Image: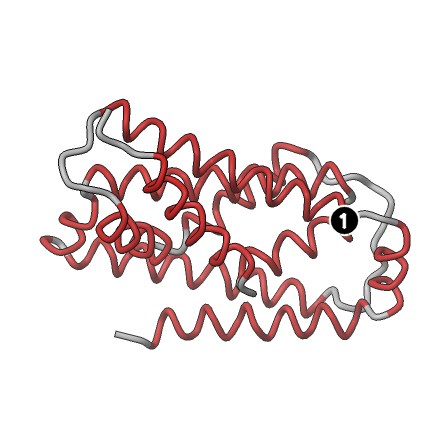
């Protein structure tokens, strides 16, 4: 294979920096974990990571070329993702004062919600494409692509699993419950602003 360890390490470094930066995915898994518990958080992270890895696969396969040739496809994805983010924001705001409840979130629904959140942001693919152009050489073999995508998926899964385990501790959950209306409305405002930004920007 033409893929080198140094290239993979560089790719992981950029991905970790992106994962650690506050964003829609971080807000989403935080809320999913403290409201639904550890399993819901891990399942949400699985969905987020799977979608992100699939965007990387799309970037490696050249989906950015399709977006350049047919700009309406990118616009359609962006608008759809923005509407989904705004819907989440509205629901979060409306239920800010509602109790957490004891019913666990179904794993399948948590995974799907995480995937929809990241699928709704085609900028994830454009980010992956930019990183790929800088880090990796052209003409990657199928085996190289498989390694990169699997590496990305495992890194995201490990990160979100660790985050879910940390957020599901009783101390953090109690702290969230006491400040739930404030946290939920901050999250709703940020998610809604991101959705509006996706709609308004060119």
Q: Nearer the viewer, residue 139 or 172?
A: 139
Specify the quadrant that holds the C terminus: bottom left
In percent of width and height, residue 173 lies at: 85, 55
- Mark 1 is surrounded, within 10 Å at the Cα level, by few (under 14), some (14 to 19) or many (20 or more) other residues, namely some
Specify the quadrant that holds the N terminus: top left
Q: Nearer the viewer, residue 139 or 181?
A: 139
Position of 36 with respect to 157 (left or right) is right
Q: How many marks?
A: 1
Say which element carries label 1. Answer: helix
Q: Is residue 87 above or below residue 150?
A: below
Q: Choose top left, top right, bottom left or bottom right for residue 8.
A: top left
Q: Is residue 200 above or below residue 89?
A: below
Position of 17 with respect to 89 (left or right) is left
In percent of width and height, residue 147 lies at: 36, 28
Q: Which residue is mark 1?
A: 166
Q: Is residue 192 above or below residue 149?
A: below
Position of 166 with respect to 174 (left or right) is left
In percent of width and height, residue 87 lies at: 54, 62
Q: Extreme left residue here? A: 69
- Which residue shows up at 61% across the image and 38% down it? 109
Position of 51 with respect to 186 (left or right) is left
- Which residue shows up at 13% across the image and 56% down it? 68
């Amino acid at each position: 294979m033409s893929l080198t360890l140094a290239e993979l390490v560089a790719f992981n470094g950029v991905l970790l920096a992106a994962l650690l930066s506050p964003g829609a995915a971080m807000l989403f898994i935080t809320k999913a974990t403290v409201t639904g518990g550890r399993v819901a958080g891990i399942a949400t992270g699985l969905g987020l990571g799977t979608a992100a890895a699939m965007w990387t696969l799309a970037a490696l396969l050249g989906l950015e070329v399709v977006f350049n040739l047919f700009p309406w496809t990118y616009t359609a994805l962006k608008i759809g993702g923005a509407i989904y983010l705004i819907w989440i924001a509205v629901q979060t705001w409306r239920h800010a004062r509602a109790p957490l409840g004891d019913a666990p979130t179904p794993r399948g629904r948590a995974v799907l919600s995480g995937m929809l959140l990241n699928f709704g942001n085609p900028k994830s693919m454009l980010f992956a494409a930019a990183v790929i152009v800088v880090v990796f050489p052209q003409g990657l073999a199928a085996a190289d692509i498989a390694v990169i995508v699997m590496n990305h998926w495992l890194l995201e899964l490990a990160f979100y699993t660790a985050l879910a385990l940390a957020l599901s501790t009783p101390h953090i959950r109690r702290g969230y419950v006491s400040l739930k209306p404030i946290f939920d409305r901050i999250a709703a405002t940020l998610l809604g602003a991101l959705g509006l930004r996706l709609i308004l920007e060119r």
